[in-house]
Image: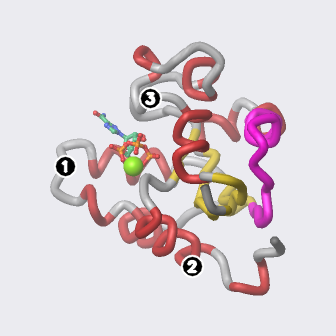
Amino acid sequence: MAIQRTFSIIKPDATARNLTGKINAKIEDAGLRIIAQKRIHMTKEQAEGFYGVHRERPFFNDLVSFMISGPVVVQVLEGEDAIAKYREVMGATNPENAEPGTIRKEFAESIEANSVHGSDAPETAAQEIPFFFSDDEIVG
Ligand code: RTP
Ligand code: MG
């Protein structure tokens, strides 16, 4: 399996509970390297653009409101099979269905306030990384 990059967000529910370090430990323990990271407060326009694929979904407005409700930490992760590996470390979207030991099982509050985002495919990662990072902010 090739070395890949994936895009991650530590969501407002997690930053509010001061969980950035604990989540980063799970990422690093899985063998993924944090090669870019910054704490930002997303604008409404950024959140709407980032989640544009979900525009028609019933939860879109709530999701945008949630993502701008507090600071987030955006990251680029690098490692072997990073996209699928991070999805595994995250656990299922709904924490009730997440495997023990995953970030969402341990930390998520609900299907919406589920602590982390991770790209779901190479094409998604290739769009999401430059949405928040310029090349010189990523140090592999
Ligand atoms: P993410 O994009 O954040 O990594 O999560 P995901 O792939 O596991 O889930 P996705 O289907 O892409 O949904 C994006 C985010 O929208 C919120 N959501 N709310 N209220 C609901 O039924 C509902 N469903 C999804 C979650 O924050 C989810 O992560
Ligand atoms: Mg998704």
Q: Which one is earlier in the sequence, the residue at label 3 or at label 2?
A: 3
Locate residue 111, reporting x and y percent: 40, 28
Mark 2 is on which residue type? Pro
Q: In the image shown, does 36 or 87 lie closer to the viewer?
A: 87
Label 2: which residue?
130
Mark 3 is on which residue type? Ala
CB within 8 Å, label 3 to label 2: no
Q: Does the magenta portion include 28? A: yes
Locate residue 28, reporting x and y percent: 81, 42
Residue at 27% from the left image edge and 62% from the top image edge: 53
Residue at 53% from the left image edge and 76% from the top image edge: 131
The image quadrant of residue 77 is bottom right
Quadrant placement of the C terminus: bottom right
* Circle 2 Cα neighbour tier, 10 Å, few/some/many (<14 / 14–19 / ≥20): few
Left or right position of 136 against 71: right
Locate residue 21, reporting x and y percent: 83, 38
Mark 1 is on which residue type? Arg
Left or right position of 93 against 3: left
Q: Secondary structure at mark 2?
A: helix
Label 1: which residue?
57
Label 3: which residue?
92
